[in-house]
Image: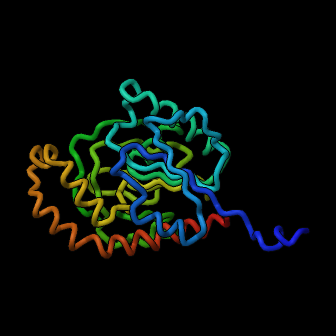
Amino acid sequence: MTAAEVGAGPAPRRAIVLRHNDHITLGNLEPVLRERGYDIRIVDAAVEDVTALDPEDGDLLIVLGGEQGAYETDLHPHLADELVYIRGRIDAEKPIFGICLGAQLMAGALGGHNYKGEKPDLGYREVELTEAGLASPIRHVAGVGMLEWHGDHYTLPERATLLASGDAYDNEAFAIGDFGLAVQFHPEVTDDMHEVWTLNSTELFAEEGVDADEWRALGRGHQPPMQLASRAMFSEWLDGLGL
């Protein structure tokens, strides 16, 4: 072994991140990854060729949220490519974490039904944990208002284990074996992201009767405990992967 090899140390872990909109990012999950030595590759799913990706590449795949509907594959053909890619990742039993649209795509890749909900779910909600959820990293969000900002949902596929439910929609979080985690709520949102999303939601807020200033105040009250719960949840899940 050469001196260079002795001092090189282990190769960094690699996280591949599927992003669907520029303003929907890793947010407060990024520092948790950096602290654990992950190199992060952002893939703009709407621009880059997802079919060129190897489902088994990378130590971790994160599928972020987005403004598209998981069922809108005709309007957004890249979503169909993502479903195939995600299914390949799951079949290989390689670590994968999905948020909102990402969770919907994970469910859809396994045969779950993606659909437009009856009404958008906007607010900070406490989710109800199942027995499996209480024994998982999701337990860290118990009793904490987690940010809901979506209008679409999904049915739970057979291979998934329900971890949490909500008042508006039944399936808030699920696991796939010991390598997959999906959440409908948004644990990643920072204060800056919250403000950008608020500015981008003028039409939605008008339709739903949401006052933007009241929404900002709601965020100021709920964001600090939510981000602590998010860090604890994501950190424990990452550490449990044994990478």
The image shows residue 52, relative to residue 146, as above or below, that is above
Could you say where residue 230 lies in the image, as x and y percent from the top left? 41, 68
Can you say whether 231 is above or below 192 in the image? below
Q: Is 90 drawn above or below residue 219 in the view shown? A: above
- The residue at 59%/63% (across/down) is 38
What residue sits 38% from the left and 50% below the top?
100
Q: Residue furthest right?
A: 1
Near-viewer residue (112 or 190): 190
Residue 175 visible in rendering? no
The residue nearer to you, when weighing 137 against 56, is 56
On the picture, is 213 further left or further right than 113? left
Question: Which part of the image, by quadrant, shows the C terminus?
Answer: bottom right
| Residue 226 location, quadrant | bottom left
Closer to us: 179 or 214? 214
Q: How many marks?
A: 0
Apparent side of residue 117 relative to residue 72 in the rendered image (left or right): left
Q: Position of residue 51 (x, y in %)?
A: 58, 32
Residue 113 occupies which quadrant of the picture? top left
Structure colour scheme: rainbow
Residue visible at 34% across and 36% down in the picture: 115
